[in-house]
Image (spheres, rainbow, N blue to C red):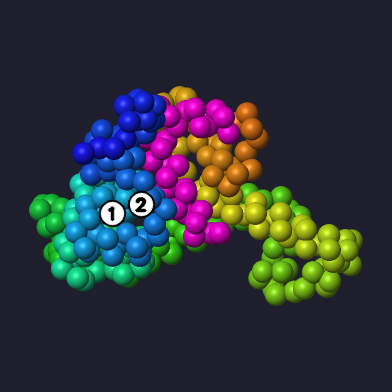
C-alpha cells in the first residue's frame, strides 16, 4: 500500500524518463538516494530491486556516454542494459563488486562493447586475413584516456594565476610560504588563492562530464551551468533557472544525476 498522499504525488516533479522503467520508482523510495554504493550493493544482494534501480539511476547516463565513447553510439542503450544485467546476475549470486560499482560497471561495459565490436568484425567481408580475429583492447577496466583528457582540459580552462599556484603546490609539492615572493603574495593569500583554484578545478572537471548534445535548444544554456549548480556556486537567478528546467527535462536530469555522483568523488 502506498503511503504517499495524493497531494504529494501530484506535486512530485516528473523527472524520470519513461524509457528508464527500471528507475521508475526512484522517487517513491526515500532514503535510497542517500545510501552509498556499497550499501546499495548489499541491499541488491539481499534481493532489493529498488536498490539496484538506484544504482541504475546513478550510472546509466555515464555508462551510455562511455559506450558511445567506445564506438557503440547506435547501441549504447543496449550495451548499458546488458552490462547492468550481467552485474546484477553476479550480485545476486554473491559475486561481483562490493564497493566500486561504477568502476566494475564500466569494466563490464568495456568488455561488452569490445565483444560487439569483435562480432561485427567477424561478419565483415574482407580479403585481408590479418584483420581476422584481432584482439579488441578493453583497457583493463581503466578510463585513463577519458579521465586524463578531462583533467587536462579542466586544468587548461583555468586562469593563468590558478594554474600557476596549482602546479607549484600540487605538482611540485612546494609550500605556500615558498610561493609568496614568486607571486608577490603573503602565505595566507597564497593559501586562499589555491583554495579558490582547487574549487575552480573541481567545477571545471565536472563541466567536462556534461554532454551538450541530445537535448533541445533550451537545454544548452542549462547544461552550461550544471557544474556550477552542482557545486553550489551558481548565482541565485541561474540556480532557479536550472532547477525549473530540471523539473521538465528528463535528459538533463540524467546529466545532473551523473554530475552529483562525480562530484562526490572529487570532494
Residue in the image at 26% along x and 54% along y? 52
Measuring from the top left, give residue 240's x and y in whole percent. Answer: 57, 29
Residue 165 visible, this orientation: yes
Up/down of 77 relative to 137, above or below: above
Q: Is 6 located above or below residue 27 in the figure?
A: above
The residue indicated by pointer 1 is 51
Magenta segment main secondary structure: helix
| Of 37 and 2, the residue lying toward us | 2
The segment highlighted magenta reads 239-267
Q: Residue at x 49, y 56 (%)?
A: 264
Name the residue beneath numbered marker 2. 32
In the foreground, 153 or 224: 224
Indicate the quadrant where residue 112 lies. Answer: bottom left
Instruction: For mark 1, give the secondary structure.
Output: helix
Counting from the top left corner in percent of width and height, residue 35 is at 39, 57
Within 10 angstroms of label 2, few (less than 14), some, or many (20 or more) residues?
many
Amino acid at each position: 500500500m502506498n503511503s504517499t498522499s495524493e497531494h504529494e504525488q501530484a506535486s512530485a516533479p516528473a523527472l524520470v524518463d519513461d524509457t528508464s522503467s527500471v528507475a521508475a520508482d526512484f522517487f517513491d523510495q526515500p532514503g535510497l538516494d542517500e545510501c552509498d554504493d556499497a550499501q546499495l550493493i548489499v541491499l541488491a544482494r539481499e534481493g532489493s530491486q529498488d536498490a539496484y534501480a538506484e544504482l541504475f539511476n546513478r550510472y546509466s547516463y555515464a555508462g551510455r556516454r562511455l559506450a558511445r565513447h567506445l564506438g557503440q553510439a547506435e547501441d549504447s542503450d543496449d550495451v548499458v542494459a546488458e552490462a547492468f544485467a550481467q552485474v546484477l546476475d553476479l550480485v545476486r549470486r554473491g559475486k561481483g563488486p562490493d564497493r566500486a560499482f561504477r568502476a566494475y560497471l564500466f569494466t563490464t561495459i568495456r568488455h561488452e562493447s569490445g565483444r560487439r565490436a569483435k562480432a561485427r568484425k567477424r561478419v565483415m567481408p574482407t580479403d585481408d586475413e590479418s584483420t581476422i580475429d584481432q584482439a579488441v583492447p578493453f583497457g583493463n577496466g581503466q578510463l585513463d584516456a577519458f579521465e586524463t583528457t578531462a583533467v587536462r582540459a579542466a586544468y587548461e580552462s583555468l586562469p593563468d594565476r590558478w594554474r600557476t599556484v596549482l602546479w607549484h603546490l600540487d605538482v611540485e609539492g612546494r609550500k605556500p610560504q615558498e610561493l609568496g615572493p614568486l607571486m608577490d603574495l603573503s602565505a595566507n593569500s597564497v593559501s586562499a588563492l589555491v583554495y579558490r583554484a582547487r574549487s575552480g578545478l573541481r567545477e571545471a572537471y565536472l563541466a567536462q562530464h556534461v554532454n551538450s548534445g541530445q537535448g533541445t535548444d533550451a537545454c544548452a544554456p542549462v547544461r552550461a551551468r550544471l557544474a556550477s549548480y552542482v557545486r553550489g556556486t551558481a548565482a541565485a537567478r541561474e540556480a532557479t533557472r536550472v532547477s525549473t528546467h530540471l523539473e521538465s527535462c528528463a535528459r538533463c536530469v540524467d546529466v545532473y544525476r551523473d554530475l552529483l555522483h562525480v562530484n562526490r568523488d572529487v570532494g
